[in-house]
Amino acid sequence: MVTFLSGGTGTPKLLEGSESVVSRAETTVVGNTGDDVELGGLLVCPDIDTVLFQQGDVLDRELWWGIADDTTATHDELHRLAESAGLDGGPRYLSDDRQTSGRDISRWRRFSGVAEFMLLGDRDRAVHVTRTGLLDEGKTLTETTRILADAFDSPTDVVPMSDDPVASIIHTPDGEMHFQEFWVARGGEPAVTDVEFRGASEARPSPAALDALTDEPVVIGPSNPVTSIGPMLAIDAIRDALESTTVVAVSPFVEDRAFSGPAAKLMEAVGYQPSTAGVAEAYPFVDALVLDDEDGTTLDRPTVRTDTKMDDAADAARVARAVSDALEVA
């Protein structure tokens, strides 16, 4: 049995090959929910959904989000309506008083659906409609996620880090914005001065997540340490659990070169070196790390090296075997 912490695309890519080491039925994935947004009244959980779609074998593996070959009729019509009505596009936050009122899922992450700034396919949207409806019926996010996992015939148990709302807020010289505005709408271009995980101090880990982190060894894939894994670490009980169990992490860097995404910019903004050394500093609870063959970083913990680039399932299986080796020496 192994538990994976998952956010972004790094850990899902590793999961592509993890069955060479542990069966999917013996795997739990704890998903980051700091990237979640409420868009047009629907709760969108990007990091959870990437794993659900992957486990259900419908993931768009070119983009690593959304459902393969999905249609976009509703999204296209939303933009046509906004353009015809002369409404501004781009992210349209709801007013301040509506950011924390209404549904319990509100937490400074609510956007109008007018000219929606995130591309939601039609089948993808059906997931968000179902999720939000189940939450409105009184189910927790954990219960809702497991219902959706069953609908996709997921062999892996997928659970959210928390049933409480947490929002990854990017601080820039021009003000605050949700991570999805920073990354999706603005392409990660704004300068970053800090990153805040709003709501984390009040959030509790979901019982299923805490059980998985307490009972099994934990693997952190090559995900962004700040916005993919950071929201989980910002919840005290999750961090405490990680300090008490065996943890292996795969570096998303080769020395000071990030594989993808805004990891380097965000790590620097929160005071870590944008490098493998910085990852080790951000993860003091990690017992062993998997580094790339070309990464000459010297660390104070056991390391296992392999080619950590993952372009397909064979690559992912190679990295998963290195993770297994790291668990042996951790």
Image (spheres, rainbow, N blue to C red):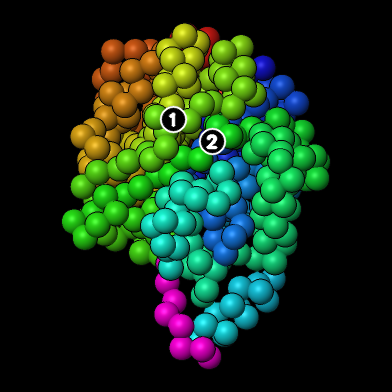
Q: Outermost residue toward the bottom?
A: 84
- Residue 34 in sight in this render: yes
Q: Position of residue 265 (x, y in %)?
A: 26, 47
- Which secondary structure class fits the magenta region best? loop
Point out the tag, 1 or 2, that comes first from the N-terminus.
Answer: 2
Pointer 1 with pointer 2, Cβ within 8 A = yes
State the residue in front, 145 or 138: 138
Q: Residue at x 54, y 55 (%)?
A: 38
Quadrant, the N terminus: top right
Q: Residue at x 48, y 21 (%)?
A: 238
* Residue 101 shown in magenta: no
Other residues around mark 2 within 10 Å, as few (<14) / some (14–19) / many (≥20): many
Residue beneath label 1, please?
202
Residue beneath label 2, please?
164
Residue 32 as seen in the image, left or right of residue 170: right
Q: Amino acid at mark 1?
A: Glu
Tell me where the magenta segment starts and ends, as one range: 84-91
